[in-house]
Amino acid sequence: MRITQGCFSFLPDLTDEQISSQVDYCLSKNWAIGIEYTDDPHPRNTYWEMWGNPMFDLVDPKGVMMELEACRKQFGDHYIRFNAFDSTRGFETVTMSFIVNRPKVEPKIRMIRQEVDGRSQRYSFETVR
Amino acid sequence: MDGDIPAPLPTTVDLRAEYESSGVKELLDDLDHEMIGLKPVKQRLRETAALLLVERARKSLGLTHHTPTLHMSFTGNPGTGKTTVALKMAGLLKRLGYVRKGHLVSVTRDDLVGQYIGHTAPKTREVLKKAMGGVLFIDEAYYLYRPDNERDYGQEAIEILLQIMENNRDDLVVILAGYADRMDKFFESNPGFRSRIAHHIDFPDYQNEELHRIAAHMLTEQNYVLTEGARAAMDDYIALRRGQPHFANARSIRNALDRARLRQANRLFSSAAGPLDATALSTIEEEDIRASRVFSGGLDSGRKEDAA
């Protein structure tokens, strides 16, 4: 099942060149790029593993692309995303986030129904490989 | 989608027009105007600009071209303008489109080499990431290599640098800088560097007369003037200072002027009785310069700083 989260996720996967120009845009806005990866794309799994520190004071997207390459080498079969962090006072938050790498076979997300308290239903989701 | 039909290649190219429209002319004129002396350096910069311009023109006509190796080494004594010229070089490469952003990242051994095992590689990579798309200026590059200690982590930094210099030639330009003799030794023991560096530019020491013009230039920029006597004192100062240890060309002059300003401020403060006008505030007298230790036999032994 194709996971859609963050920017551009309803578009076809971005090529490296496209990723690079998105990063260029982020850097032109003075946002810091952080790389994160995970094997569990559950929507409640907000905090992915960090690949190194977020990259402040870069000028050119090549630096980020080098890190992405290194991350792909090690976690090629994981989800990898870029988070762009805006440090402007009053924002101080991630302003843009997009997926840059997907596993070959994506896990499914299954809904689980559970009956509780008489006929009430509880719903939850889990990732199934 | 653009680029479906390739645009027909132009059949001629006007180098002169390229030279002017790319902003290279402006930059080189600026260099001529701002930097005093340094004839051979300016000459080399012009030659480099010409080569790059022709390479670019060849590319636009669809002729075979290969990205020239742009890594450089700047050798010369301290205070001869290596960093300033590196900044200009970054601007030049940016205008000609050989680097994407054209910023200058200036580092020394401390920024590249770590303190314990496994610390160096990430540290060097961090710096290289910052320098991508621009120029990496490594000052006193020979400190990276310490032949007396074979376990020194500098070697690791050198290996990463060499690898990046080879594989990311389109992404960044590395400039190594330092004293001529020590750089020669450094290149001898690291043949990898020698073969990857195409341009060696030597920065000559400034002549006394050039230093005097530099001093005048610096003062004009800061809105100060020298009196007739102070000008003569400055000439004597330059001649004397050159013979003393730790002479650092234009940097020594800048420090001397800073100290002269300090003395001038002190003099005004202690002697002025009434209101001062702009002329008094911006005039440096002979005594402000003559008070320097350089005139009384130079540095005290043990003091390592520049003489006042």
Image: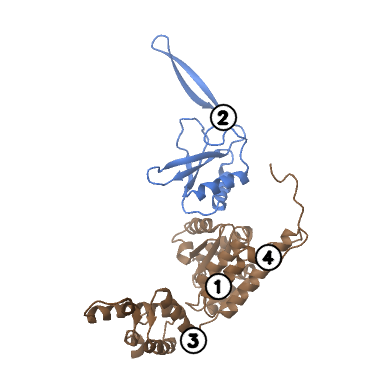
Chain colours: A blue, B brown
Residue drawn at the location 39% of the way across and 75% of the way down: B223
- Residue receiving disc 1: B31
Cβ–Cβ under 8 Å for marks 2 and 3: no
Q: Residues within 10 Å of mark 1 (few under 14, many from 20)?
A: some
Q: Amino acid at mark 1?
A: Leu
Q: Is residue B179 visible?
A: yes
Q: Which residue is mark 2?
A: A107
Badges 3 and 1, same chain: yes
Question: Which chain letter goes with mark 4?
Answer: B
The crowd level at tag 4 (other Cα within 10 Å; few <14, some 14-19, many 20+) is few
Nearer to us in this view, B163 or B27: B27
Label 4 with label 3: CB-CB less than 8 Å:
no
Q: Quadrant of residue B299?
A: bottom left
Callout 3 secondary element: helix
> To which chain does the residue with label 3 belong?
B
Q: Which amino acid, by three-letter code, is at mark 3?
A: Glu
Q: To which residue does mark 4 refer?
A: B17
